[in-house]
Amino acid sequence: MESQDEKYFSLGNGVKVRKETDLVDVWRNNGFLFRGELDPREQTPEFRHFVVELVTKYQAQKTKTAECFSLSRQTIDNWIDSYNQYGIMGLINSSKSGGGRPRGNKAREHETTRSAQKQEQYENQLSIFDIQPSVSQEIEPVEEPFYETTQSENNRYAGQIVYQILLSSMWNWYKLTNGYYGVDYKIFQIFLLMVGKNIGSIEQLKNVHQDEGGTILGLSRIPSLPTVWSWFYTAAERGVSQQMCVSLRNSQLRNGLVGTNFWFTDGHALPYSGKERLRKVYNTKRRLVEPGRTNLVTCDIQGRIVDYQIQEGQGDLRARILTVHQNVGSQLPEHPVQVFDREGHGNDFYYGLVTAGCPFVSWEKHADQKKLAGFSESQFTEELTYNDTLYRFIETEKKLEAEIVHQEQVIKKSFKLRRFYVCNTKTGKRTSVLANNATLELSQQDCVMAILARWGASENTFKYLNKRHPLHYQPGFTYSESKNQLIENPEIKKIDKEIAKHTKELQGQYKELSKKEKQINKDGSLRKNDVYTQYKAQITEEEVKVQELKEQKKQLPEKIDISGLQDYESFKGIDNEAKTMFDFVTTAVWNARKEGVDILRKYYSNENDIVDLFYAITHSHGTVQITPQKVIVTLEPLQQHSRRVAQIDFCRYLSAMSAQTPNRKYLIVQVARN
């Protein structure tokens, strides 16, 4: 909608434009991107290319873009198809033939092309990235969700249908769970209620009304706890959770449900309080080291979860970033920019990203604070506004050197990175940022905005997830011997203690020596056994000991394998199958929540209250009626008028999505009249 003051038009996904007579300014997430010298009233090739870039490169919504520039969605689709097929020449109107450009009705031609593409996608839908049904996944009709018909019955969990509509229409929920787990999909329906209602464990299901909970999940009822545990263990034995997560990830990428411009990877500690000996992780929230695992999560700039992996102990953030770039980013037309914190600092790692062609942005660790403070305010010439805060910055270049081991030889490689010095004008705090373009053309604003957005995308995802959903829950633990039985060499620790002890003694002796003077005999010769000489001898002896200890330390291996030692208890590893199954549901619900809030934003303008409104709708009571053709959920209306109007429009939108169960029943949600 156009703002009365600034004439901004919001195009969705953080993109907005400001139109003037012959200029169009483009902003994203309150950061200025570029200015186009265009006249939006004329559909010139430059203007068409500008519109195509807004939609394809910056993820602006087609409907809002069409409304802003007085176009139709079909026109934008035609321009995109022409550009994808013929490049910039496809956006030029000409009555002349030649140049390889299409002639005739473009809409019909593109429709034919799209139909062919859809047919090709349909024929190839059982690729390695999709579900491959087999006989083991066949389900009897009586076992399908919402098989039984019911009259309109009161239900305390009626609002949870919102998640099922979003997931089944956009995330292929039933296709994923039924395709991989067959009749065992029911445990994922149970998990769906647990995550949606923030039920902390399977044991807490005893507090759920079994009949009502079962009805909204499409089951006859939620069974007793022993039966639920039986469902869980049967499903876990299949061992296909990781494959299902890969399918979810690729489905999201294919359907545009997650952004692909910037990806933020960060670790989140999963603490462990059991009796087994596990590797330790540093819990930044509690500021201590404790047994546990690390969930390395990759999010897009909106905080939607793209992918995750659970690792032992502290986890390897650097290896994870490279894996995401090579295995996931390589499937996309352009590699996403990897954004990470100081944990990824290291010249060798940076060089690895550069040689792998991976664009990235990261905080610079151990930045020269004196140099940062030495810049005058006038030197910060560029500006960027982000989250209502003005940042000023300058760009320089940093030369780095990495040590690469090649054929048992250490080779030094020199390379360069972009470096930004950023100043927060509110607090005066200054920091340093490193960036690498790779094959992309990253603007200065892109680089600075990416690192400023890191807290919102990666950190706050964990924060809000933990507040609204059972983020840390692990349904059952299965242990095995960890493959990593290496520990820091205890002999090195002993030597370090000895070195510290002798170093402390040396410091005291240096101090005492400074108070002494060399004594001289009456004949003018130096005394051979005075106090000064004794201290010098003691210092020399201590220095020799320290040097000997350091030489001993160099000869010892840094880590040793304790699997063959009798005096050490081996490390245990937790089987991640159970946690991966539960986190699959948590990921799907979280991303559906983000999508639901974006939809709700069309009907509700109070940004500060919109998330609470979404949860108010999903926690609404109501009635559920199951017919042979439909599942009709009627929610109780919210009290406040503006919230109730938004609730009604939101439910109408969801019903219009035509979500269906595997047995072809439509999922309908509506609001009861006052």
Image: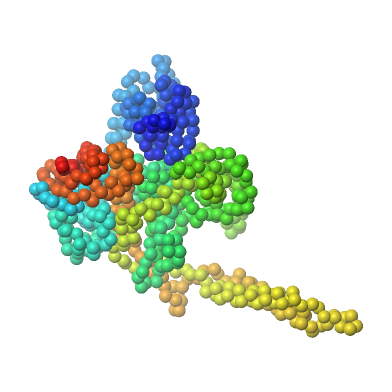
Is residue 329 something that shows in the picture?
A: no
Tell me: 155 left or right of 90: left
Tell me: 492 left or right of 606: right
Q: Residue furthest top?
A: 95
Is residue 547 something that shows in the picture?
A: yes
Q: Residue furthest left?
A: 151
Q: Residue at x 44, y 44 (%)?
A: 387
From the viewer's side, name the closer residue of 224 and 11.
11
Q: Residue at x 37, y 28 (%)?
A: 68
Q: Quadrant of the C terminus?
A: top left
**Is residue 519 positioned above or below 350 on the image?**
below
Tell me: 104 left or right of 158: right
Q: Residue at x 31, y 58 (%)?
A: 470
Q: Residue furthest front?
A: 640
**Is residue 358 positioned above or below 283 on the image?**
above
**Is residue 280 positioned above or below 67 on the image?**
below
Q: Residue furthest right?
A: 523
Q: Position of residue 461 (x, y in %)?
A: 38, 52
From the viewer's side, name the closer residue of 131 and 34.
34
Q: Position of residue 404 (x, y in %)?
A: 58, 55
Q: Position of residue 323 (x, y in %)?
A: 44, 51
Q: Position of residue 632 (x, y in %)?
A: 15, 44
Q: Residue at x 26, y 59 (%)?
A: 199
From the viewer's side, name the closer residue of 405 and 495.
495
